[in-house]
Amino acid sequence: MDATPAIRMLENGIPFVERCGFKIETLEPGRVVCRMPIEGNTNHIGTMYAGALFTCAEMPGGALFFSTFDPAKCFPIVKALDLQFLKPATTDVRLEISITDEAIARIDAALEANGKAEFVLEGELTDAQGAVVARSRGVYQLRATNPPKKPA
């Protein structure tokens, strides 16, 4: 899979995301690694702005969708995202999110049967020293572009 078009669209397709400098370092089936730079994303006390951390935690769900599921059959939405702030971030922040082959198969089966499928992605946002600065828990849903017909 050539991830370049998906990465370009994810990094540049939403003006806010492009302005804050969000980058995808790795995009492969079932796994995404991303980074949010500290430069341009500081708050009034010189640490990373909460909105930048939130963006870094939310975007991997969409990225994982493009590398793992068929965009011709479905589209993703974010149903919820919880972010627990643990420590001020004073460097770039990195996040790796992954999903197992078994989970992918369950999601695909639910999507086929119901026209939608929900899944949870949890991650740890780490600073340049590897310290966890925040924990995320995102609830995502895939919705079929052509959902199955319900019996009359």
Image (cartoon, grey):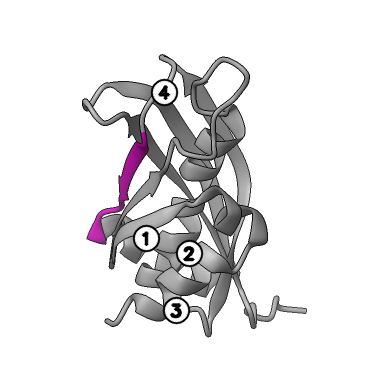
| Numbered mark located on residue 75 in the image | none
Contact (Cβ within 8 Å) of mark 2 with mark 4: no
Q: Position of residue 44 (x, y in %)?
A: 62, 19
Contact (Cβ within 8 Å) of mark 3 with mark 4: no
| Nearer the camera: disc 3 or disc 4 | 4
**Magenta region: which residues?**
92-101
Asked if residue 96 is among those painted magenta in the image, a careful observer would answer: yes
- Residue at numbered disc 3: 70
Q: Tell me which numbered mark, 3 or 4, is placed earlier along the sequence.
A: 3
Q: Amino acid at mark 2?
A: Ala
Image-quadrant location for residue 133: top left
Classify 10 Å Cα crowding around label 1: few (below 14), some (14-19), many (20 and above). Answer: some
Rendered-image quadrant of the N terminus: bottom left
Give the Cα distance between marks 2 and 4. Answer: 38 Å
Give the Cα distance between marks 1 and 4. Answer: 36 Å
Q: Tell me which numbered mark, 2 or 3, is placed earlier along the sequence.
A: 3
| Nearer the camera: disc 1 or disc 4 | 4
- Residue at numbered disc 2: 110
- Residue at numbered disc 1: 106
Classify 10 Å Cα crowding around label 3: few (below 14), some (14-19), many (20 and above). Answer: few
Q: Amino acid at mark 4?
A: Ala
| Numbered mark located on residue 89 in the image | 4
In the image, what residue occupies the spot 59% across and 54% down?
Answer: 19
Left or right: 97 in relation to 44: left
Left or right: 18 in relation to 56: right
Q: Tell me which numbered mark, 1 or 3, is placed earlier along the sequence.
A: 3
**What secondary structure predominates along the stretch shown in magenta?**
strand
Contact (Cβ within 8 Å) of mark 2 with mark 1: yes
Q: Position of residue 22 (x, y in %)?
A: 47, 52
Give the Cα distance between marks 3 and 4. Answer: 35 Å
| Nearer the camera: disc 1 or disc 3 | 3
